[in-house]
Image: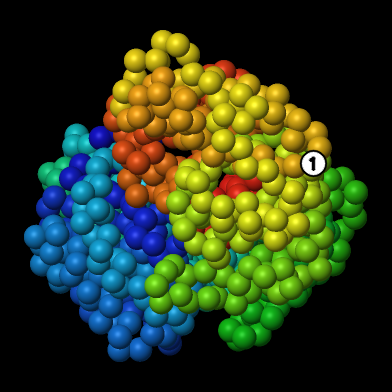
Amino acid sequence: MTISDDLKVPDGFSFAGVSAGIKARKRDFGLILSEERCTAVGAFTQSALKAASVKWCQRLLPSTNVRAVVVSSGNANTLTGAQGEEDAKRMAASVAGKLDIPVDSTLVATTGVVGVRFPIERVQAASGALVKALGADVRPLAESILTTDTETKIASREIFLGGTRVRLLGVAKGSGMVHPNMATVLGFILTDARVDLPSLADIFRRVTASTWNATSVDHSTSPNDSVLLLANGVAENHPITDASSEGRKAFEQALLSVSDELARKVARDGEGARHFVEVEVRGAPSDEAATDFARAIVANNLVKAALFGTDPSAGRILAAVGARAGERGIRLAEQDLMVTIQGVTCFAQGEPVDFDRDGLRTQLRQREVVIAVRVGPAATSGRAYGCDLTYDYVRINADYAAVLADPDGPVRRDTRLETKTPELKTEILISALRYIERFANTRAVIRYGRATLESSQRAVAFAEDVRLLSSAGLLPILVQEGSSELVVTALAQAGIRAVGLSGADGGLLAWPSAHSEVKEGPLANVVVDPDVVETLLAKGYVPVIVPEFTEEALRIVGSGASLDVDRVAAEVAVACNAKKLIFLGETAGIVREGTLLSELSVDDLSLRLEQGRIEPSLIARCSAAREALTRGLDSAHFLDERTPHVVVAELFTETGVGTMVR
């Protein structure tokens, strides 16, 4: 089936990706299911220290009995001892049981932090949701396997074998710790072709050598690398068995094309990379030697740093070649050497040649760099892919900081600013100052609930956030669910001048006469007079609104009536011309298929409300937000008030931590 104009999905496969809580917010648990048994082979890390998932797959492959692949990201389940191996089996079994398939027909792949106990209970608890989420769209799976990647990596091809349509689909991840011999790469290639096991293994071996194993980002190898190839035969083509058949050649070329595209995407997405680098070497004693030379060039840190600095250094390139030739015992003649960068010859016949250095430096500012090297007279060639080495690569990995393993929660990183580099601290400060400038003298209505009011610790933390927001120039207007004095007291202790307001104070809240007959349930359509709020803001006070009826009002609307606090917050935001409306509650935000949605448009929100795709506890807030947004509010935010400093994190970071509706 076709998901988009250029993406072809083989018949007989379905996919899923959900959040199991291994990572804090994103999809981290994925599944591939074949409706028929697959012929399957794999290529794995050559590290002597292998992940539990690798050991599990190596025991099962090659095979003609594979039905599923279960994958998780965020925790590598590596160097976790016998318990880690048992957890890999339990992960396979938890999904296999829900699918009613044999556990030994279920492969496993993991990626993420090394040396931390695997949260198997969370994975088992999410298995049902994962199976329930199965569908035709491969993108949730592609998202679920990412770690430091900045984008998903998907490729597909469609060919015809003897008149029968055959499709191939590949999904991969990889950004850092990427080096030949699989590095920290996960790849899954699926096809509906019928291919016998010996042919599939032989084709896969050759394709892997010239694509996956010809990629390097940082010369660092991981213990988790796994690339799996599954063929379910649903296309019912004439079986591919004959090594010399045209069908086999066409299938191998299609597999090579998919793998090559994915390998290029991995190199392009190298951590901090500014340039994608392609190196081709010709003239080595063999194709394998030519590929080895190309890999040595793309992995060489001096070459990578020169390319980041747009320095056309043929000397560094040839130094990398010479070092690898010495390691392999290969003789080179200087007069045979030639180096071409971006089509410009820089070295030939054993010596440098004149070229327009400034012109070439300009060409090296392009996103892609192509280097061609000849090392001898033989008719051989090999290719490798990589990227440059940037300041950002060092910053990303230097600021990775310590990993914090919370037994009751997801793997987190030590985010304390004192653990970061001076450059990152400066970047954070500059970014924060830009937000402060953006929000100065703007109003934000913050509606908080019982989780804050019932915990003195949360109330104190919330008061501190209000103090910080006020010091940054934001003008908070608080709307409180319930009559507790806890937050007002905490604000006073934090040095904030706060004034509690009921609905009757200064005529703040009124109600249309049309509602005079309401006897029970929420009174939604209140009228807000902003004068009292504006007076307090002008004098430097933080208004704390507690929407309650006076006794006189209750006599009018009925003793059973109650105010809709969410609607009051929305009406206050509109009346006071607030820029933001923030709903704090006991949910992380708006969730789709187990994954938090970071941003929605008001049209998307309306559609979800109309289709009943909003969690019941959020319906009132979402309805109130939609009303305010259609009346001029800039954005509404849905956050978990149990998360420390959640308001600051939402407003002063680019992606935020909850759901924002524009």
Q: Closer to the camera, 88 or 515?
A: 515
Secondary element at tag 1: loop
Query: Looking at the image, is 78 positioned above or below residue 159?
Result: below
Give, as a three-letter code, the residue at label 1: Gly
Q: Closer to the camera, 58 or 550?
A: 550
Q: In this figure, what is the number of numbered marks?
A: 1
Q: Position of residue 483 (x, y in %)?
A: 50, 46
Query: Looking at the image, is 282 positioned above or below residue 84?
Result: above
Q: Is residue 250 visible?
A: no
81 lies left or right of 527: left
Q: Quadrant of residue 479?
A: top right
From the image, which quarter does the C terminus lie in? top right
Query: Looking at the image, is 129 positioned above or below residue 517?
Result: below
Q: Is residue 67 visible?
A: yes
300 lies left or right of 197: right
The residue where tag 1 is placed is 540
Residue drawn at (46%, 30%) of the image = 551
- Other residues around mark 1 within 10 Å, as few (<14) / some (14–19) / many (≥20): some
Q: Position of residue 432 (x, y in %)?
A: 76, 51
Q: Closer to the camera, 652 or 189?
A: 652
Residue drawn at (48%, 76%) of the image = 405
Residue drawn at (47%, 58%) of the image = 454
From the image, which quarter does the N terminus lie in? top left
Residue drawn at (57%, 35%) of the image = 502
Q: Quadrant of residue 204?
A: bottom left
Q: Closer to the camera, 432 or 293?
A: 432
Q: Position of residue 339 (x, y in %)?
A: 74, 60
